[in-house]
Image (cartoon, grey):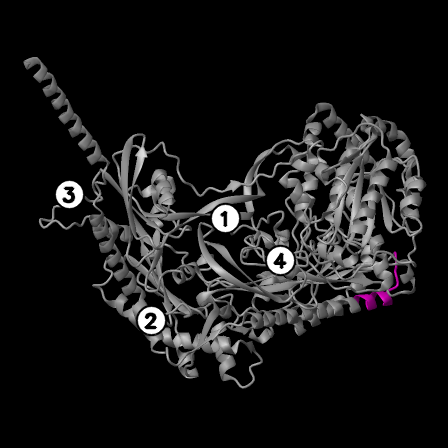
C-alpha cells in the first residue's frame, strides 16, 4: 500500500511541476509591454512636439486671421469645363503667334531665292557657327570666322548670343565652301531681317532657324557652336524630326536588307548603318518593318511577321538592337522579298493600320541581276503608288543600271554607298523625292513636333527644357518648280514652360494639374513626365519623347481618357488615382475629375485634373490695394517663381521686372501695357494682408532669448493657395542644417509650374489641426538631417472648404529625437522608478510615419529607412492585421541595370583576321576617297562596340508603397519566431501622422525576410514558338504589335501626276585607273 501511494505522489509532483512550466510558458507568451505605458509615452511626445510645431509655426494665429474674414469671402466651385476651355484658348494664341512668325520666314526665304541667280564661282564670307571668334597662331581671324559680338542673355538660358545676326552651321562631313552651300547661305542672309523683326513683334520667341536641303543650318540669334571631344559636330538639320515632318508626308516603309553571302564584312557593316540612318528619318506618324533576305525571308523581329509598327523611338531602338544579329550567307532572291514587301504594304493600306499616305520600299543590296518587272507589274503598275529606293552597297557598278531602272520605273531614287561616310548624305536623298508631291502642290503644311529636349542649345546652369517645334517647308517659286525643288524647312521652338505660364495654377488646387498630348497620345506636358536619367543631369532617356498618356495615367485601364483626347473630343472623365510624391516613395490616393478639349490649329489636346473635395473650391477675398501692396513688398514675402501673375516676357521693357514690381506697375498705372491675371493678383494681395501678422509673431519669438535656446527649431514657413510664401529664420543662414530647403534645388519643396510644395500637399491630406512630420529624403548625412512639420489651414470646418494655406517648421533631427527619448522614459509610478522604458535592452522603440519610414530608432543608421527593412516580421504582421496596407504602383518610365556585353558584330571585329581585313579595307577606301571622316567614324565605332559596361536602360517596374489605416489608433500583436513568441505594440502619436512601435527584443527574428520597397522589373519574355504561336504569343510581342488609337495628320501628299520621275539618281563616278589597281585587293578582302 505504501508503495502504491508513493507512485501517485510522484505523479502529483510531476503534474505540479508541469503545470508550473506551462504557466511560465503561457506567461511568457503574453504581452509584457504595457499598452497603457506606451500610450502615455505617445501622448507625452505628441503633446510636446505639437506644442513646439504650433508655437513656432504660428498655425493657430494664421487660422484665427483667416477665420476673421470667413463671413466676407465668397467660395466658388471651380468650373472645370470652362477652365480647360480657357487654357486651350490661351495655348492656341501662343501657337498661332509662333506659326505666323514661321510663315513670315517662309515668304522671305522663297522671295530671296527667287531673286537669286546661282553662281558656281560665288565667293562669300559668312559667319560659321563653329569658327566665329576663332583666331590662328598669328592672332588673325580664321576664314569664315571673324569677330562676332556675343552677349549673355537670360531669355536664352544665359547663353551668349547676338540678337542682330544669325550664324550658319555646316555638318562636319560637308565642305564649308561648297558652291551649293555658299549660294544657299548667300541668298538666305535675307532671313536675318525677318528673324530680328519676328523677335521684336513677339519677344517670347526663342530659337528661329532655316534648315537647308543642302545641309547647312541658319540659326537666330547667333550663337557659337562647340565640337565634341573628337572635334565633330554630328548635327544635321535634315535628320531632325521637324525637318522630316515638314518636308514629307506620313509614310509606310518596308526596308529590305540583302544578307546573301556576298554582303559579308564591310558591306554588311555599311548596310546596318544605312538601315539605322533610314530609321532615324522616320517619325511618330510613320510605320515600318525590316526584312532580311537571302534564299529565304527573315523578319528582323520575328514576332512582327507581316505587319508594320509605328516608328516611335522605342520601336526604332528595338529594331536597331536586332541589326547586329544579321549575318550574311546563301544567295539573294530579291523577287521573293519584293513580293513580301508589296503584300504587307497592300494589306496595311486596305486595313488602314498604317499611315494611310505615302508608301516606299527601301532596298539595300550589293547587286541585282534581274529587274523584277513582273513583280512591279503585278503589284505597283500603272499607279506606282509604292516608291522604290535602291541603295547599292560597295564600289562595284555592274548592277547599278538594273537598280537604277527599278527606282526610275517606280518613282524612286537610286543611290550608291561605298563607305560609312557616304551613308548619311545618300539616305537623305529619298526625303527630297518623297517631298515632290508637296512641292508641286505648293502646300505649306504647318507641322508640330512632339515634346523633345535639345540639350545642345541650353546653358550650363539650367537643365534641359522640353519644347515643341512649329515648322513649314520652303519651296522654289522659280519656273523650274515643276522639277520639285525643296529649298528647306523653317522653324521656331516653343518651350513647354511658356505653355505652362498660361495655366491658372491657383484654380487647379493643391493636387490638380494641367497636361497636353499629341495626336499619337504622347505626352507634350505632364507633371509625371521624367525625361532625364537622373534629376539634375542633362542625359535624356532614349524614349522620353514617346511616353504615352496611358503610362502616367495608368489607372485608366480602358484608355477612356486617352482615346477621347487623341480624337480631339471635349468632355469629362473621373477616376480614383494614386499620385506618388517625395521621389515616388509616398502615395496619395485622390479622386480626380478630368476635363479635356482640343487646341485648335494644332494636333494637340489639353486637359486639366481637379481632385474632389477641397480641390474643387476656390474663395475670393478683398482688401484695399494700398494695404495689399504694402504687405506684398515685405522682405519675408516671395511669390512662386514659375507662376505667372504678370507676363513680363511680352515686351522687352518689362523683362527686368520682378513679379512684385510688375504687379505694382499693373495695379497703379493707367496704361501699363502688361498682361496680368487680375483675379490672381487680387487674391495674392488678400493673402499678403492676412498672413502679415506672422512676420511680427515670428520676429518676437526670434528676439526672445528664452525661447528656442538650443536652436532646435531653425525655420518657420508658410505658403498660400496663391503661391505666396513667407519664411523666418531662427538661426543665421550659415547654421542651417538643411541649406537646400525652400530653394530652387529643393524642387519638391517649393511652388512649381506643375505642383504645390510637398509639405503643403501632405498637410492638406491630414486631419485638420494635425501636423505631418517627415525627414526629407534629399537630406544627406547624419549630421545634416532635419524634420519638417506642417499643417493645413482651412477656411471652413467642412470638406468643401478650400485649403487656404499651410504652415510649418524645420527642426533639427537630433532635437526632435531627443524629445522622443525623453517622453519614452515617463511612467505612472508614484516613486518615479519606471519598470520599463525605451532605455531597456529588452525592448526596441521606433517612431515611424504613416508611410512606414523611421524617424527615430536606437540605431542611427536606420533613420529614414523603411520600417519593413529593419523589422520585416513586425511589418508583415502589421500588414496582416490591417494596420498598414500595401499599394502596388507601376512605373513605365523606370530605369534598370543591364550588362552591355559584346554583340555579334563585336565578336566579328575582334577576330584577328577580320580586324586586319577591316583595317586594310578602310585603307583602300581611304586611298580611293581621301576621306578622313570615314576613317575616324569607323574607329570610334569599333571602340564603342568593344566597351563592355553596366548601363541603365528604360524598363517597366512594379513597386509597393505603404499607407497606415487611419481608423486604427493602437494595437498589439505576437510573432512566432521559430517557437519564440515576440510581442509588439503600435500606438498612434496624437495630432500627427506618426506611430510609436515598441517591440520585444527577446527573440531572434532575423530569419524573417525584410519587407522592402524595391521595384521589380516587369519582364516581357519574347516567345517564338512557331507551332504554338497563335496561342502562346508573349506579352512583349503583343506590346510591339499593339497599336493604340491615334489620329492621323490631316495633310497627305503621296504622289502627283506632274512629278519628274526620271530624276531618279545615278551611280557614283569612279577613278577607274586607281580602281583597276586596287579592286582585286578590295574584292578579295570584302568577300572573305
Q: Are marks 4 and 2 in contact (CB under 8 Å)?
A: no
Q: CA distance from mark 4 to mark 2?
A: 42 Å
Choose the circle earlier in sequence order: 1 or 2: 2
Q: CA distance from mark 3 to mark 2?
A: 43 Å
Which quadrant is home to the C terminus? Answer: top right
Give the foreground label among 3 and 2: 3
List the residue tagged with mark 4: 562
Q: Residue at x 54, y 76 (%)?
A: 676
Give the foreground label among 4 and 3: 4
Percent coordinates x, y for residue 794 in the rendering: 37, 69
Foreground residue, 203 or 390? 390
Percent coordinates x, y for residue 242 in the rendering: 72, 57
List the residue tagged with mark 2: 62
Choose the circle earlier in sequence order: 1 or 4: 4
Percent coordinates x, y for residue 124 in the rendering: 80, 59
Choose the circle earlier in sequence order: 4 or 2: 2
Q: Magenta residues, as a range?
A: 109-120
Q: Residues within 10 Å of mark 4 (few under 14, many from 20)?
A: many
Choose the circle earlier in sequence order: 4 or 3: 4
Q: Secondary structure at mark 4?
A: helix
Q: Secondary structure at mark 1?
A: strand
Q: Residue at x 56, y 78 (%)?
A: 674
- Name the side, left or right, on which 199 lies relative to 744: right
Percent coordinates x, y for residue 441 in the rendering: 86, 63
Labelled disc at residue 835: 3
Which quadrant is home to the N terminus? Answer: top left
Above or below 1067: residue 726: below
Choose the circle earlier in sequence order: 1 or 3: 3
List the residue tagged with mark 1: 889
- Quarter residue 62 falls in: bottom left
Give the foreground label among 4 and 2: 4
Q: Are marks 1 and 4 in contact (CB under 8 Å)?
A: no
Amino acid at each position: 500500500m505504501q508503495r502504491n501511494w508513493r507512485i501517485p505522489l510522484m505523479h502529483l509532483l510531476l503534474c505540479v511541476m508541469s503545470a508550473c512550466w506551462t504557466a511560465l510558458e503561457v506567461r511568457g507568451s503574453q504581452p509584457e509591454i504595457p499598452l497603457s505605458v506606451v500610450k502615455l509615452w505617445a501622448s507625452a511626445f505628441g503633446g510636446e512636439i505639437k506644442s513646439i510645431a504650433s508655437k513656432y509655426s504660428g498655425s493657430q494665429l494664421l487660422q484665427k486671421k483667416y477665420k476673421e474674414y470667413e463671413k466676407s469671402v465668397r467660395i466658388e466651385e471651380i468650373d472645370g469645363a470652362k477652365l480647360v476651355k480657357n487654357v486651350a484658348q490661351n495655348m492656341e494664341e501662343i501657337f498661332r503667334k509662333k506659326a505666323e512668325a514661321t510663315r513670315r520666314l517662309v515668304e522671305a526665304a522663297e522671295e530671296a531665292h527667287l531673286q537669286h541667280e546661282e553662281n558656281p564661282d560665288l565667293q562669300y564670307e559668312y559667319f560659321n557657327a563653329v569658327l566665329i571668334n576663332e583666331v590662328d597662331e598669328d592672332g588673325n581671324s580664321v576664314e569664315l570666322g571673324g569677330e562676332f559680338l556675343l552677349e549673355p542673355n537670360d531669355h536664352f538660358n544665359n547663353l551668349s548670343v547676338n540678337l542682330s545676326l544669325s550664324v550658319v552651321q555646316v555638318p562636319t562631313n560637308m565642305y564649308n565652301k561648297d558652291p551649293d552651300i555658299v549660294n544657299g547661305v548667300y541668298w538666305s542672309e535675307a532671313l536675318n531681317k525677318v528673324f530680328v523683326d519676328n523677335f521684336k513683334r513677339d519677344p517670347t520667341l526663342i530659337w528661329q532657324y532655316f534648315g537647308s536641303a543642302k545641309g547647312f543650318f541658319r540659326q537666330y540669334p547667333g550663337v557659337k557652336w562647340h565640337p565634341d571631344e573628337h572635334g565633330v559636330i554630328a548635327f544635321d538639320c535634315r535628320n531632325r524630326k521637324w525637318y522630316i515632318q515638314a518636308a514629307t508626308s506620313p509614310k509606310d516603309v518596308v526596308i529590305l536588307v540583302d544578307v546573301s553571302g556576298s554582303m559579308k564584312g564591310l558591306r554588311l557593316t555599311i548596310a546596318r548603318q544605312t538601315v539605322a540612318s533610314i530609321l532615324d528619318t522616320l517619325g511618330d506618324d510613320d510605320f515600318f518593318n525590316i526584312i532580311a533576305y537571302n534564299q529565304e525571308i527573315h523578319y528582323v523581329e520575328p514576332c512582327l511577321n507581316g505587319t508594320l509598327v509605328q516608328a516611335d523611338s522605342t520601336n526604332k531602338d528595338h529594331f536597331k538592337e536586332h541589326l547586329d544579329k544579321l549575318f550574311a550567307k546563301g544567295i539573294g532572291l530579291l523577287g521573293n522579298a519584293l513580293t513580301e514587301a508589296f503584300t504587307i504594304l497592300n494589306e496595311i493600306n486596305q486595313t488602314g493600320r498604317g499611315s494611310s499616305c505615302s508608301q516606299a520600299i527601301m532596298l539595300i543590296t550589293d547587286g541585282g541581276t534581274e529587274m523584277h518587272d513582273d513583280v512591279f507589274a503585278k503589284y505597283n503598275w500603272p499607279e506606282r503608288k509604292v516608291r522604290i529606293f535602291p541603295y547599292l552597297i560597295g564600289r562595284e557598278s555592274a548592277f547599278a543600271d538594273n537598280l537604277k531602272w527599278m527606282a526610275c520605273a517606280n518613282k524612286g531614287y537610286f543611290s550608291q554607298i561605298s563607305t560609312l561616310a557616304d551613308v548619311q548624305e545618300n539616305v537623305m536623298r529619298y526625303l527630297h523625292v518623297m517631298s515632290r508631291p508637296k512641292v508641286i502642290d505648293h502646300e505649306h503644311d504647318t507641322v508640330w513636333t512632339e515634346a523633345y529636349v535639345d540639350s545642345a542649345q541650353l546653358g550650363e546652369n539650367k537643365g534641359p527644357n522640353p519644347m515643341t517645334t512649329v515648322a513649314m517647308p520652303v519651296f522654289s517659286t522659280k519656273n523650274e518648280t515643276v522639277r520639285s525643288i525643296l529649298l528647306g524647312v523653317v522653324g521656331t521652338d516653343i518651350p513647354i514652360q511658356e505653355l505652362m505660364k498660361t495655366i491658372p495654377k491657383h484654380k487647379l488646387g493643391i493636387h490638380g494639374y494641367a497636361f497636353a498630348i499629341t495626336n499619337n497620345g504622347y505626352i507634350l506636358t505632364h507633371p509625371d513626365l521624367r525625361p532625364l536619367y537622373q534629376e539634375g543631369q542633362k542625359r535624356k532617356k532614349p524614349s522620353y519623347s514617346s511616353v504615352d498618356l496611358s503610362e502616367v495615367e495608368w489607372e485608366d485601364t480602358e484608355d477612356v481618357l486617352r482615346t477621347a483626347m487623341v480624337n480631339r473630343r471635349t468632355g469629362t472623365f473621373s477616376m480614383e488615382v494614386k499620385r506618388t510624391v517625395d521621389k515616388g516613395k509616398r502615395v496619395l490616393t485622390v479622386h480626380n475629375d478630368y476635363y479635356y478639349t482640343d487646341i485648335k490649329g494644332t494636333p494637340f489636346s489639353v486637359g486639366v485634373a481637379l481632385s474632389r473635395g477641397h480641390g474643387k473650391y476656390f474663395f475670393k477675398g478683398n482688401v484695399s490695394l494700398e494695404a495689399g501692396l504694402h504687405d506684398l513688398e515685405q522682405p519675408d514675402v516671395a511669390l512662386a517663381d514659375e507662376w505667372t501673375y504678370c507676363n513680363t516676357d511680352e515686351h522687352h521693357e518689362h523683362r527686368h521686372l520682378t513679379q512684385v514690381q510688375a504687379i505694382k506697375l499693373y495695379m497703379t498705372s493707367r496704361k501699363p501695357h502688361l498682361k496680368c491675371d487680375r483675379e490672381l493678383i487680387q487674391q495674392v494681395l488678400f493673402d499678403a494682408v492676412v498672413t502679415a501678422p506672422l512676420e511680427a509673431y515670428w520676429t518676437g519669438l526670434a528676439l526672445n532669448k528664452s525661447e528656442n535656446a538650443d536652436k532646435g527649431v531653425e525655420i518657420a514657413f508658410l505658403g498660400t493657395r496663391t503661391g505666396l510664401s513667407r519664411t523666418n529664420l531662427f538661426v543665421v543662414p550659415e547654421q542651417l542644417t538643411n541649406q537646400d530647403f525652400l530653394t530652387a534645388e529643393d524642387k519638391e519643396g517649393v511652388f512649381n509650374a506643375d505642383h504645390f510644395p510637398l509639405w503643403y500637399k501632405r498637410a492638406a491630406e491630414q486631419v485638420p489641426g494635425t501636423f505631418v512630420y517627415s525627414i526629407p529624403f534629399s537630406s544627406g548625412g547624419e549630421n545634416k538631417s532635419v524634420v519638417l512639420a506642417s499643417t493645413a489651414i482651412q477656411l471652413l470646418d467642412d470638406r468643401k472648404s478650400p485649403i487656404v494655406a499651410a504652415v510649418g517648421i524645420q527642426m533639427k533631427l537630433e532635437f526632435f529625437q531627443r524629445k522622443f527619448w525623453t517622453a519614452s522614459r515617463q511612467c505612472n509610478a508614484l516613486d518615479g522608478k519606471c519598470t520599463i522604458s525605451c532605455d531597456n535592452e529588452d525592448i526596441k522603440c521606433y517612431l515611424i510615419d504613416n508611410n512606414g519610414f523611421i524617424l527615430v530608432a536606437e540605431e542611427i543608421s536606420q533613420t529614414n529607412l523603411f520600417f519593413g527593412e529593419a523589422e520585416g516580421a513586425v511589418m508583415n504582421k502589421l500588414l496582416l492585421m490591417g494596420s498598414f496596407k500595401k499599394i502596388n504602383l507601376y512605373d513605365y518610365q523606370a530605369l534598370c541595370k543591364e550588362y552591355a556585353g559584346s554583340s555579334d558584330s563585336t565578336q566579328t571585329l575582334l577576330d584577328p583576321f577580320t580586324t586586319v581585313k577591316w583595317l586594310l579595307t578602310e585603307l583602300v577606301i581611304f586611298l580611293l576617297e581621301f576621306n578622313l571622316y570615314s576613317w575616324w567614324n569607323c574607329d570610334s565605332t569599333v571602340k564603342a562596340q568593344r566597351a563592355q559596361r553596366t548601363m541603365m536602360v528604360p524598363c517597366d517596374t512594379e513597386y509597393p508603397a505603404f499607407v497606415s489605416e487611419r481608423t486604427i489608433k493602437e494595437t498589439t500583436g505576437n510573432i512566432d519566431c521559430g517557437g519564440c513568441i515576440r510581442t509588439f505594440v503600435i500606438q498612434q502619436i496624437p495630432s500627427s501622422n506618426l506611430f510609436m512601435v515598441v517591440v520585444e527584443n527577446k527573440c531572434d527574428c532575423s530569419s524573417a525576410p525584410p519587407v522592402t520597397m524595391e521595384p521589380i522589373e516587369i519582364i516581357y519574355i519574347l516567345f517564338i514558338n512557331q507551332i504554338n504561336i497563335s496561342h502562346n504569343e508573349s506579352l512583349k510581342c503583343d506590346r510591339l504589335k499593339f497599336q493604340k488609337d491615334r489620329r492621323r495628320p490631316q495633310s497627305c501628299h503621296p504622289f502627283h501626276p506632274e512629278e519628274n520621275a526620271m530624276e531618279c539618281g545615278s551611280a557614283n563616278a569612279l577613278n577607274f585607273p586607281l580602281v583597276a589597281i586596287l579592286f582585286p585587293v578590295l574584292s578579295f578582302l570584302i568577300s572573305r
